[in-house]
Image: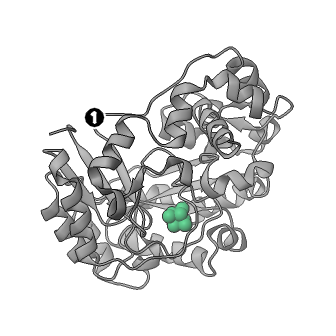
């Protein structure tokens, strides 16, 4: 047995949304079969004594047979992680068995992502009615004993919506109503990672001066959620500072681990669960190459991005692709990945 644990997520059905920030990138939906799911599980089975198989890496429970898929993936797995707080609000408003089912699996808090008011949220989700579905979902969740956890992605073109969001939380009495179902209400905001679709929003990335526009209460809730002292511990440092700091950083890195997570897309291309699924992270195609070759590629840092990460010092990437004039705020880990993506694209 090679790996202590191996987790595999197959993108069987995709997602109803087309979010502007999607780190996985926006691609057409697929429609794979249970046979495809079993094929993926069987391919990776010989390489670990602890396999976990998932039927999606985009929208949770988007498939109509989500309950059957939960049972099948449980049988195909040695370990089954409890259902995440990520849920499908698309399904919540269309399927009245869904939320009681989530509750039966032990879900007590469910994450919903908003971007501001109705117009702004629908724009960023890329789907009309998304905001109204989120409002309906909040009511259905609370009615079923589940607390809504609100996440917000912020950019220069939606940061002015924060007072509206605070007012919405207050009008809906989310703190009090979450306490009524035995949970502390959670809200947090951040920029997300500057990868996938989100990289296209670089020009809208917040800068230091935007931090003052964040209402104190939302700052405090965010810092609390991340266990940070100050909101800047979450939002990061200006790119200018990071450029200075990293210009002497000769470190290189490897993502190879004994407990990898692999994404398999609807064409059976396999990617490590580290960055956006893109050609330079691709480890191979499961149908054409087989699991053994893919694992060898992973372990030898053989994908283009892994090779760059292992051999090119971060200082060289900053020199080539850093923007020392920029005051955009980045977490350091995210900025390093942002530079890596740019470097790979420039090869
Ligand atoms: S961010 Fe999530 S919900 Fe939005 S398009 Fe991507 S996978 Fe779908």
Q: Position of residue 158 (x, y in %)?
A: 75, 58
Q: Is residue 248 left or right of residue 102?
A: right
Q: Position of residue 179 (x, y in %)?
A: 39, 54
Q: Is mark 1 within 8 Å of ligand 1?
A: no
Residue 38 visible: yes
Q: Nearer the viewer, residue 172 or 253?
A: 253
Q: Nearer the viewer, residue 334 or 166?
A: 334
Q: Nearer the viewer, residue 276 or 66?
A: 276
Residue 107: image quadrant is bottom left
Is residue 92 positioned above or below 259 on the image?
below
Q: Position of residue 41 (x, y in %)?
A: 22, 61
Is residue 161 positioned above or below 66 on the image?
above
Q: Residue at x 19, y 50 (%)?
A: 51
Q: Nearer the viewer, residue 328 or 209?
A: 328
Q: Which residue does the numbered mark 1 point to in the structure image?
A: 258
Q: Residue at x 70, y 61 (%)?
A: 164
Is residue 291 positioned above or below 248 on the image?
below
**Residue furthest to the right:** 325
Q: Quadrant of the N terminus?
A: top left
Q: Is residue 327 left or right of residue 122?
A: right
Q: Quadrant of the C terminus?
A: top right
Residue 102: image quadrant is bottom left
Q: Is residue 133 left or right of residue 163?
A: left
Q: Colour scheme of this structure image? A: one colour
What is the crowding at mark 1: few (fewer than 14 residues within 10 Å), some, or many (at least 20)? few
Q: Position of residue 206 (x, y in %)?
A: 76, 44
Residue 154 visible: no
User: Dot 1: what SS?
Assistant: loop
């Amino acid at each position: 047995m090679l790996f202590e644990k191996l987790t595999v997520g197959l993108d069987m059905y995709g997602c109803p949304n087309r979010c502007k920030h999607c780190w996985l990138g926006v691609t057409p939906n697929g429609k794979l079969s249970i046979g495809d799911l079993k094929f993926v599980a069987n391919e990776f089975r010989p390489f670990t004594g602890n396999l976990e198989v998932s039927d999606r890496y985009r929208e949770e429970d988007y498939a109509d047979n989500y309950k059957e898929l939960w049972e099948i993936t449980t049988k195909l797995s040695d370990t089954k992680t409890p259902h995440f707080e990520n849920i499908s609000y698309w399904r919540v408003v269309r399927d009245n068995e869904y939320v009681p089912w989530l509750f039966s699996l032990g879900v007590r808090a469910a994450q919903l992502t908003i971007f501001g008011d109705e117009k702004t949220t629908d724009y960023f989700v890329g789907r009309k009615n998304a905001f109204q579905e989120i409002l309906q979902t909040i009511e259905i969740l609370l009615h079923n004993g589940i607390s809504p956890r609100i996440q917000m992605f912020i950019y220069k073109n939606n940061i002015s919506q924060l007072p509206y969001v605070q007012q919405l939380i207050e009008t809906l009495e989310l703190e009090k109503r979450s306490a009524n179902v035995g949970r502390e209400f959670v809200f947090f905001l951040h920029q997300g990672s500057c990868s996938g679709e989100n990289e296209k929003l670089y020009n809208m990335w917040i800068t230091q001066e935007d931090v003052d526009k964040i209402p104190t209460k939302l700052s405090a809730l965010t810092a609390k959620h991340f266990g940070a002292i100050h909101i800047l511990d979450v939002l990061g440092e200006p790119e200018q500072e990071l450029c200075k700091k990293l210009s002497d950083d000769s470190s290189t890195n490897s993502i190879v681990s004994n407990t990898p997570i692999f994404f398999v897309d609807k064409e059976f291309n396999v990617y490590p669960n580290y960055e956006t699924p893109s050609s330079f992270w691709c480890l191979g195609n499961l149908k054409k190459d087989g699991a053994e070759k893919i694992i060898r590629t992973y372990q030898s840092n053989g994908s283009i991005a892994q090779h760059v990460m292992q051999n090119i010092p971060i200082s060289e990437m900053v020199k080539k692709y850093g923007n020392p004039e920029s005051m955009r705020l980045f977490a350091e880990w995210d900025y390093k990945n942002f530079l890596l993506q740019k470097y790979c694209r420039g090869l």
